[in-house]
Image (spheres, helix red, strand yellow):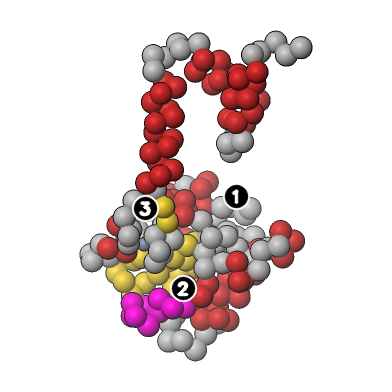
Amino acid sequence: MNALPQPVVELIAALRRLPGVGPRSAERMALHVVQGGDGDVAEALSAALLHAVKTVTTCERCGALTEAQPCAFCADTRRDGATLCVVERATDILSIEKSGTYRGRYHVLGGRIAPLDGVGPEELRIGELVQRLEPEGVREIILALTADVEGDATGHYLAKVLAGRGVRVSRVAQGLPAGTGLDFADELTLSRAIEGRREMT
Ligand SMILES: [Zn+2]
């Protein structure tokens, strides 16, 4: 027999599907919610969850998270439209924005080439990237990919695809922690990495 009522067990199981939530914290959260220790936390949480899921989508142009089409980055005329920073995930944009040094626009690939996980170039938003070059007058592409084997492979593939299309392709300087993505790179490391970008040949 389980010591907890079945609905609580199900709530714990649902919470554990979230990244970074282990069994103990899931149990603590679930018990906090059902015991009503925090007023109407359950109602506020479920309303906010549904609202966010219903209203937030990805920008059709760049792939950033947004409520409107196009997103605020694509719509902002003060940003330099001739420069695109290519990232793996929409959340990488937040890290680069925090560094405060980048004033161009973005393009989210939606992952990176990882043959062992069955992710090939056709699964990524590479065709969409190429289609943006001419209409938006893109002259420079900065690849801000993770510094590991798969990030390198993706970078080289993109450099090949973009060669001969009249855009300068550079890659942010090494220094991003391998395998952890941009989430964990501190702001100073990131702005130095962007400033010290090297052209790919
Ligand atoms: Zn956008």
Name the quadrant containing residue 93.
bottom left
Which residue is label 2 attached to? 129
Which residue is label 1 attached to? 180
Tell me the kind of residue under disc 3. Answer: Thr
Of circles 3 and 2, the one toward us is: 3
Of circles 1 and 3, the one toward us is: 3
Tell me the kind of residue under disc 1. Answer: Thr
Query: Residue at the location (45% across, 69% down)?
Result: 142
Q: Is mark 3 within 8 Å of ligand 1?
A: yes
Q: Quadrant of the C terminus?
A: bottom right
Identify whether 94 is placed above or below 158: above
Question: Callout 3 environment at 10 Å: few (<14), some (14 to 19), or many (20+)?
Answer: some
Q: Is residue 144 visible?
A: no
Identify whether 11 is placed above or below 144: above
Query: Residue at the location (51% across, 81% down)?
Result: 162
Question: Residue 193 lies in magenta, yes or no?
Answer: no
Question: Callout 2 environment at 10 Å: few (<14), some (14 to 19), or many (20+)?
Answer: many
Name the quadrant containing residue 45.
top left
Comes first in the chain, label 3 or label 2: 3
Residue 28, given in percent of the width and then of the height, sits at 57, 18
Comes first in the chain, label 2 or label 1: 2
